[in-house]
Amino acid sequence: MIERISSPIKTKEIIEKNNFYFKKNFGQNFLVDSNILDNIISAANITKDDFVLEIGPGIGSLTQYLAESAGKVVAVEIDTNLIPILKETVGDYDNLEIINEDILKLDINALVAEKNNSKPIKVVANLPYYITTPIIMELLEKKVNVESITVMVQREVAARMQASAGTKDYGALSIAVQFYSDAKTDFIVPPSCFMPRPNVDSAVITLTLLGKKKVETIDQDFMFHIVKCAFGQRRKTLMNTLNNLGKLNLSKEEITEAITSIGISEKIRGEALTIEQFALLSDELYRRSKK
Ligand code: SAM
């Protein structure tokens, strides 16, 4: 059997041999539990037919499992100090390509076009926590050709992704995740499975992108503009938020009319609206602003 990079002894050895220092600002908490890695591969249902994009390979703990299960893996790592280490730990896998780049600056659509002929990919990652929301929003909203996203996130972020209207966890992330995908928490991961240990529990969550949307709307970008504004000022009434939105070009009366036409009170806060209500409202506002 091939030696696992993820064993605590091996990880420590690699770190010390290379004089590597963990960078907190890059969210570097490496996985040191082989059961968890096996479970991530099962949750993502990786087969040799899959093209996988890994975000943040670290020293290659998850990368090794992915390269052994998938057809092709592209791993994007921001930390230049990790590139020579990855060459040593996983450089022998000929179905693996490592790119030294900030994933938030990379044109993922262009990458998928170039490396996988724009065919659907799977995203699998133990995400650095500070980029969880922007990267998930980007993958969903930029309409990258993704089949599924299986990621380790903070447990409370997994809860936010699945939150219902009116709860404290509900926000723009919940709406984007539930609008574009079916979300399922696969399992919870305690701090002891990482080196160094984070302060909070983590969760692996899989988002399976929907072929056909559950909720229809005239213009998705317009709807998400309304959603983000509503949650940007979540203590204000929806009426006040929309009234301050320059882009709308509608009078207070027209906004009130749009809100009440879908059967809700003008005094309601945005956080109380379901995704279906956001879609109905944004369609009403869209039609009125195009008149
Ligand atoms: N996959 C490894 C594992 O499971 O042990 C490492 C996971 S660690 C939580 C996050 C990794 O993402 C680190 O290697 C970090 O350097 C990298 N990273 C942080 N920000 C990044 C970014 N913007 N783009 C690409 N990689 C990033």
Image: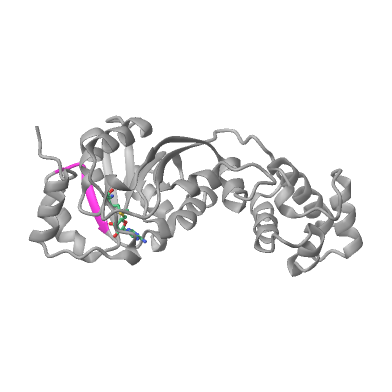
* Quarter of the figure with residue 96: top left
Q: How many marks?
A: 0
**In the image, is residue 95 part of the stretch drawn in magenta?**
yes
- Image quarter in which the N terminus is found: top left
Q: Check the image and report above or below for 133 versus 34.
A: below
Q: Residue at x 15, y 50 (%)?
A: 11
Q: Residue at x 46, y 43 (%)?
A: 145
- Image quarter in which the C terminus is found: bottom right
Locate ligand 1 by image quadrant. bottom left
**In the image, is residue 138 part of the stretch drawn in magenta?**
no
The one of 53 and 240 positioned closer to us in this rendering: 240
Q: Check the image and report above or below for 175 versus 40.
A: below
Q: Position of residue 223 (x, y in %)?
A: 69, 52
Q: Position of residue 136 (x, y in %)?
A: 48, 51
Q: Is residue 91 visible?
A: no
Q: Residue at x 49, y 48 (%)?
A: 156
The reply, left or right, for residue 115 in relation to residue 133 is left
Q: Position of residue 86 (x, y in %)?
A: 17, 54
Q: Position of residue 245 (x, y in %)?
A: 75, 67
Q: Residue at x 65, y 46 (%)?
A: 167
Q: Is residue 75 visible?
A: yes
Q: Check the image and report above or below for 136 versus 69.
A: below
Coloration mode:
one colour
**Magenta region: which residues?**
93-99
The reply, left or right, for residue 59 in relation to residue 278 is left
* Quarter of the figure with residue 240: bottom right
